[in-house]
Image (spheres, rainbow, N blue to C red):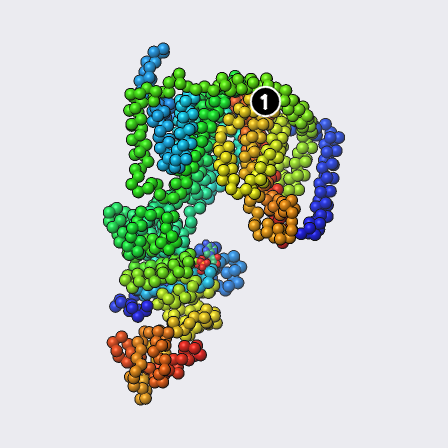
Amino acid sequence: MSLALRIDNLPHIARSSVKCVVAVVAMALITNLGPGWLSTIPDWLMFPVSDIVGDSLTWFAREATIGGIAVQEITRGFAGLIDKPIEAAVVVLADGLFKGRGLDVTQSVPPLSWLALGGAAIIVAHRFGGSALALTTSICVAFLVSFGLWQNAMITLSNVLVSVILATLLGLVLGIWSFRSTHVENVTRGIMNVMQTVPIFAYLIPTLLLFGYGPSAALVATVAYALPPMVHNTVLALKSVPAETIECGRMTGCTQRQLLWQVQLPTALGKIAVGLNQSIMMTLNMVIIASMIGAGGLGFDVLKALRKLDIGGGLEAGMGIVALAIILDRTSQAIAKRAAHGKHREPGQWPIWKVVGLWLVIATGIAYIFEPAQAWPKDYVISTAVFWNDLVTWINIEWFDVLDAFRTFALLEVMRPFRDALAAAPWSMMIGLLAIGAYALGGARLAIYCVALALAIVMTGYWGPAMNSLYLILISVTLAVIMGFPVGFWLASRPQLQTAANLTLDTLQTLPTLVYLLPAVMLFRIGDVSAVIAVTLYATAPAIRYAMIGMSQVPVARLEAAQISGCTRWQTLRWIRFPAALPTLLVGVNQTIMMAFSMLIIAALVGTKDLGQEILIALNRSLVGQGIVAGLCVACLALIADALLKAGAARAVTHRHKKED
Amino acid sequence: MANDIPASQDSNDVPMLSCQGIWKVFGTNKSEFERSGGPDMRDQELARRGWTVAVRDASFDVARGEVFVIMGLSGSGKSTVVRCLSRLIEPTNGNILVEGEDLLAANEAQLLDIRRRKMGMVFQHFALLPNRDVLGNVAFPLQVQNIERSKREERAREMISLVGLEGREKFFPDELSGGQQQRVGIARSLASNPAIWFLDEPFSALDPLIRADLQDELLRLQKQLHKTTVFITHDLDEAIKIADRIAIMDQGRIVQIGSPEDLVLNPGSDYVKRFVKNVPRSKVVRVSSILRDATSSDSVGDIVVKANDRLADVAPKIGGSTQSIAIQDDKGVTLGYVDRDKFVRVLAGVV
Ligand SMILES: Nc1ncnc2c1ncn2[C@@H]1O[C@H](COP(=O)(O)OP(=O)(O)OP(=O)(O)O)[C@@H](O)[C@H]1O
Ligand SMILES: [Mg+2]
């Protein structure tokens, strides 16, 4: 890592960069000055992909028969079947039972009261996470109750519970199956990889077509969305069981079944539980989004508020989502931590189900006698909606000049020109540049892979919206990195802050995406600026996290060596820390981009003009083909970015090793 | 320890465990190995096919109640041998007899039964189940056999007190120290009262002091239980301390089998010689192995030592004497004599 070495490297770098520049310039000249079809996509390159996909899916859903039974019948029946557990959960947790018809409907059996459920949540939190977690949970419960969000939160919770249970069962079965057979594992891994890059809305469209508007469509979409990580985690967890532990099971004479149930699964439980926590949070995110197709609950409130631009109402429901997310995340994490150990309770403690059961009985008794314990009285509901709306109005009056100046500046001076440049750039030039970049980073193979994905976008006719997505992503990711990396670097040098930082980042990342739209809309109304701000907010967390990890993991010996050689702080940063952290930083950028993509699609709700908007329009108008194909285009963009950055990170690693040799 | 247990208590003299010409070649299977030439293949041929030979042509018998130690450097194939003996790893070639019965011919169900009733194993990294407390871990082998709860817990408690962990039945593995965890592992391996006891580097993951404790513990248990034991270690001192016989492995081959004294006094190759060079002989060699027959000049004089004493134990007695030293067995019968001169030379390692 000496200076001499670096200078030795220079000619090589210079030579390859000269080559690159020449290639880029040549590419720009050819594509701009060449025949017209190089700059505007010719018709012969476009295929009616969306029509084909749409028609065949519609045919499948409406007319196809399997073994003489119409698919429509099957899906209807299936929808009816999976409606039942959701309905049951909603009855128990949120709505209760009703009798009578029309106007004289009366509640015959109330649902479990907020006192019962909230108390149960606090008891569980206390058992697994101690008094700190119990306090957090109490605050969240109190918020939900006193702001009148309880019932909607319980509808959301019902959906989450049923989806999580289904996804867990399916995920375990598929995971165990994949673990036992490499063939199955290859198949599931392939499918799961694609599924994880497809944007969240795209899940809603086929399920909507197959199951119709309503909770069952939402449930199917949610389960499909939460399944891949569950399967993946189950396989990883089972693989992590030490070989000796399995040998011990075999030596004691376990049958295959005993080995699985008494050795492998229990030993893997801790890791499986960590995966379960992830799937719970993904489920919550999806359930919120799926209120678009009839899941109801808190998500629906936010969407309604966004449509009416009722920021106050939206913020309140959004905070409700945050409260619910915090309870679910912290508690399931605490339980996961406990599951890794065998110890479930102190000697003399009652098993948790007994305590909770007893509490439910007592609380229901109290609620029966004392009405406010059943349903929080309307007169005592605090609403801050008015306050928030006033605040927004106030901000918009008092700060209008500043905000508007910022907005206009950003829009006119930065975003529009960039967008227009991307839109005006010949498609062939963009693909050519992509090819050069990919070749430089990872060779011919990578170049072919990326170009094929890009050409797929060209053929579908979504090139324009795709460039719009690209522009939003690039700006947001740049901002996220510019803001996130320095914070991460700073945190890396302050180990005492890292636990708190990790907790905050965890919480930020588990919050459902929809919530991030609210503050942006509050300040900048509808449009690209709000979208960029929301995406940036969401994508900054991984940037901070990876910067922190990358910088903290530089070997101490190297830092000491630098100190001994009398490096200044800046020199140490430039020559020691940064090169060592580079691969991790690139992984961080990759994560940031992936997060940005998932948020960008949601940001379509505040009026972008990109692929996300295409999907949203398709969703609203039931244009199945368009929706799915636009979704796949997003996946293509994400896959290209992923491949490029992974190649970059791999190069950074080998480069570093070469230098070290 | 050899003297505590007769080499064979059995009149019919079938070894408890016998393996003949065991090979384990990774990367191939039995039939392919045989088709390609089997045990007669030369090293280059094996290497050319990209196979790894972990064990080649290992043969030995383990008598009932004997402590048989397999010793060798890392990667020499010790773990593979011991796993072949229980068919955790399927040997590529050779025969294994358990009490005269062919282990490799056993089908899946018979194998389960043999493992459940006849074999117990202790692992280097303990391999405890993290979700069960001490009691649950020790009772696990019995639970697998569907033995009813009260019975298996009673037996488990017995085993727990045998290894000195009473009072910790309700502790979970991550609440125990490494030494305690391995005691649980030992108790578990003994729960189903197996005749054959496998220990794969059971103490390698422990600190030296705790290791010594557990070695003593093992000797104590063995004195009480007389298990037929196959013990793996890479530590020669440990091997000498507990072994009746030691097999030394090098690159998959067993290069010498013998009692600790044998190895120290008559190393069969340079490889073994290098190993035993630094072992203090006085702590290994018994007086009986250097005795000579009585001559007319000998008489049972002042100095009488027991045949099974080690040289180091008797050296102080020999101190100022110029006489030859009488050697007697436990019953007081004189077996022979050793000259002081010879004694000193053996002690010094000149012979
Ligand atoms: N599953 C396997 N596949 C291929 N080669 C293996 C496998 N298991 C072991 N080997 C090889 O067989 C040889 C013997 O391994 P083994 O584990 O028996 O050694 P060991 O004497 O127990 O060493 P250690 O003291 O490190 O435990 C080693 O060269 C190892 O690389
Ligand atoms: Mg080993």
Q: Which residue shows up at 71% across the image and 47% down it?
A: A10
Q: Residue furthest bottom?
A: B296
Q: Position of residue A192 (x, y in %)?
A: 49, 36
Quarter of the rendering containing residue B292: bottom left
Q: What is the quadrant of residue A78 in the picture?
A: top left
**Chain letter for the residue marked with disc 1 in the picture:** A
Q: Nearer the viewer, residue B111 or B298?
A: B298
Identified at 51% across, 26% down, the residue is A514
Local SS, label 1: helix
Figure quadrant of the C terminus of chain A? bottom right
Image coordinates of residue B273 in percent, x first then y, are 46, 72
Side of A310 relative to A527 (left or right): left
* Left or right of residue A225: residue B112: left
The residue indicated by pointer 1 is: A524
Looking at the image, which is closer to me, B28 or A629? A629
**Eyeballing the image, is A529 above or below B22?**
above
Q: Residue at x 53, y 43 (%)?
A: A495
Task: Classify residue A6 as left or right of residue A373.
Answer: right
Q: Is mark 1 within 8 Å of ligand 1?
A: no
* Vertical position of residue B161 compared to residue A593: above or below: below
| Residue B241 visible to the viewer | yes
Report the residue that reaches farthest toward the top: A103
Q: Closer to the camera, B210 or A586?
A: B210
Q: Residue at x 40, y 43 (%)?
A: A340
- How packed mark 1 is, by other alpha carbons closer than 10 Å (few <14, some 14-19, many 20 or more), is some
A380 left or right, relative to A628: left
Residue B201 appears in the picture as rendered: no
Type of amino acid under label 1 = Phe
Question: Looking at the picture, how far across and down is residue A489, in whole percent?
Answer: 58, 40
Q: Position of residue A447 (x, y in %)?
A: 64, 39
